[in-house]
Image: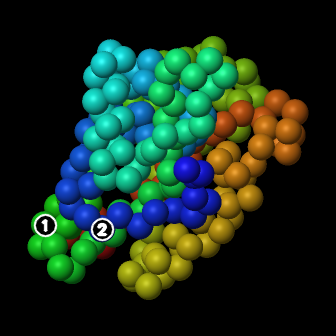
Amino acid sequence: MVMERQNRMVDDPRAMRALAHPARLAILSRLQAQGPATATECAAAAEVSPSAASYHLRMLAKYGFVGDAPARADGRERVWQALHRGLTMVENDRAPDSAEAVGEVTRAAMNMWTADVMRFLDRYGGESREWRQASRIGQALLRVDAEELEGLVASMDALLEPYLARDRAPQDAPTGARRVQVLMQMFPLAPERDRA
């Protein structure tokens, strides 16, 4: 199997709930970002044992997130790969619990991404001045309607597209380029916080 270039739209609440496990998210993220890997290699990324990683890989395979990759030269270990370059969770009108499932998997992903931010802040002083000045963690409060927000998200996606690490080979990037995480969080405030 070869990884598909487009994102997979996930609307099955069972698949979303299977993906909402922190170790599974970490394993899938590792496979999407760095390519095929064995259960042992995935275990390191997810901070679980190789046997636990094997279990999580089988669960991811059950829902079509990962599959077998071509065997390595020695052929002794099973090699796994992500089947899609990215995932988009969408609500399913036929499944009444899909909105809750989208929330569960998004919450699990946010926990993983927040941990990445905290690791960056822990090593902040050890980063070069150039990278510290180029990095940005901030917040902006917008006043938009749903249609404007949808357009803004699409514009930002288009702006980031040429730089996506999954599509831009290291040899195509400038010398010194590193993978940089971009988090976008655009959501309406709760009514009690949306005053003025």
State left or right for residue 153 relative to residue 180.
left
Q: Distance between the residues labelled 1 and 2?
A: 11 Å
Residue furthest front as drawn: 75
Quick one: 12 or 173, which is closer to the camera? 12
Q: Give residue 48's position: percent from left, percent from top.
A: 33, 19
Q: Residue at x 57, y 22 (%)?
A: 75
Dot 1, how many residues are within 10 Å of its Cα: few (below 14), some (14-19), or many (20+)? some
- Which three-letter amino acid code belongs to the residue tagged 2? Asp
- Please identify the quadrant where the C terminus is shown: bottom left
Q: Residue at x 83, y 43 (%)?
A: 173
Q: Residue at x 20, y 56 (%)?
A: 14
Q: Mark 1 points at which residue?
A: 97
Q: Is residue 73 visible?
A: yes
Vertical position of residue 179 compared to residue 161: above or below: above
Q: Residue 170 carries which label?
A: none
In primary-sequence order, the first of circles 1 and 2 is 2
Choose top left, top right, bottom left or bottom right for residue 99.
bottom left
State left or right for residue 162 relative to residue 67.
right
Q: Give residue 43's position: percent from left, percent from top.
A: 40, 21
Q: Give residue 93's position: percent from left, percent from top.
A: 21, 80
Q: What element carries label 2?
A: loop
Quick one: 180 or 66, which is closer to the camera? 66
Q: Mark 2 points at which residue?
A: 11
- Which three-letter amino acid code belongs to the residue tagged 1? Asp
Q: What element carries label 1?
A: loop
Say whether marks 1 and 2 touch (CB < 8 Å). Answer: no
Vertical position of residue 5 compared to residue 75: above or below: below
Dot 2, how many residues are within 10 Å of its Cα: few (below 14), some (14-19), or many (20+)? many
